């Protein structure tokens, strides 16, 4: 029986398979490299697009911050302007107060009492004077208490003296000036409380 040697054919087939495997492996490697490169390009493109959007957002935020700062500056200027207007309005309302005050002092001063000095510190008034008797000083205090421009009379000193040869009582008296500005603020506050009570 003749013998057939199949080793060369099998060796040839093995070589062909090895070559085919190497070709397939090389193709897969190239394909994987191309896919990785394409993914890298895609990711870089996405990153660039996101960076562009972020930069746009940052620019818009800077613009908004600047606008907010301008609004805050305008609001601060508005508050200062309103405060100045309120001060001017208060001064306008309080301008005739000094006239009313001196007129009220002259009206509430009883007979037999004259003042030697009047000093005002803010809304606090100090009266130095001489009265024929201490009862005249008491009358002056009652008149102040009943006045619409003066309030809270407080007697600090009263002493009997014979100045200018006539007996009398020298006194120092304090009182508070009633401000129309304060009265307006109090009436507005009472009106707001009343409206809140009605709303409830």
Image (cartoon, helix red, strand yellow):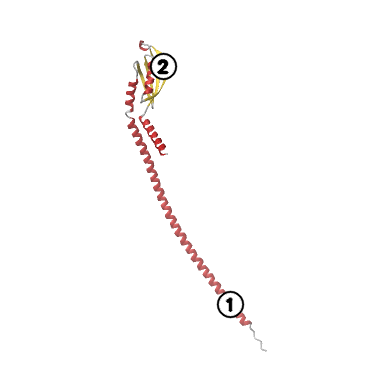
Q: Quadrant of residue 174?
A: top left
Rounded to the nearest whole Å, what is the CA distance between mark 2 and mark 1?
133 Å
- For marks 2 and 1, the one nearer the N-term is 1
The answer to whether 132 is drawn above or below residue 125 in the figure is above
In the foreground, 175 or 61: 175
Relative side of 168 to 37, left or right: left
Q: Circle 1 sits in a helix, a strand or a loop, which is it?
A: helix
Picture residue at 39% right of the left edge, 15% below the top:
135
**Residue 127 can be seen in this image:** no
Say which residue label 2 marks.
158
Q: Quadrant of the N terminus?
A: bottom right
**Disc marking residue 5:** none
Location of residue 94 in the rendering, given as x and y in whole percent from the top left corner: 34, 30
The answer to whether 68 is drawn above or below residue 135 in the figure is below
Mark 2, residues whose alpha carbon is within 10 Å: few (<14), some, or many (≥20)? some
Relative side of 28 to 199, left or right: right
Q: Quadrant of residue 82?
A: top left
The answer to whether 128 is drawn above or below residue 77 in the figure is above
**Residue 160 can be seen in this image:** yes
**Disc marking residue 17:** 1
Picture residue at 36% right of the left edge, 41% below the top:
78
Mark 1, residues whose alpha carbon is within 10 Å: few (<14), some, or many (≥20)? few
């Amino acid at each position: 029986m003749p013998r057939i040697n199949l080793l060369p054919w099998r060796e040839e087939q093995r070589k062909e398979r090895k070559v085919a495997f190497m070709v397939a492996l090389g193709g897969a490697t190239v394909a994987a490299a191309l896919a990785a490169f394409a993914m890298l390009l895609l990711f870089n493109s996405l990153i660039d697009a996101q960076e562009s959007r972020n930069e746009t957002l940052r620019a818009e935020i800077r613009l908004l911050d600047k606008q907010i700062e301008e609004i805050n500056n305008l609001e601060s200027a508005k508050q200062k302007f309103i405060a100045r207007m309120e001060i001017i309005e208060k001064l306008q309302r309080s301008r005739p107060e000094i006239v009313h005050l001196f007129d009220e002092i002259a009206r509430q001063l009883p007979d037999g009492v004259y003042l030697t000095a009047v000093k005002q510190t803010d809304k606090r008034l100090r009266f130095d004077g001489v009265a024929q008797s201490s009862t005249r000083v008491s009358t002056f205090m009652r008149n102040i208490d009943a006045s619409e421009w003066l309030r809270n009379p407080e007697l600090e000193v009263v002493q009997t003296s014979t100045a200018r040869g006539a007996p009398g009582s020298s006194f120092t008296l304090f009182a508070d000036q009633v401000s129309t500005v304060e009265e307006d603020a109090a009436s507005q506050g009472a009106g707001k409380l009343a409206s809140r009570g009605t709303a409830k």
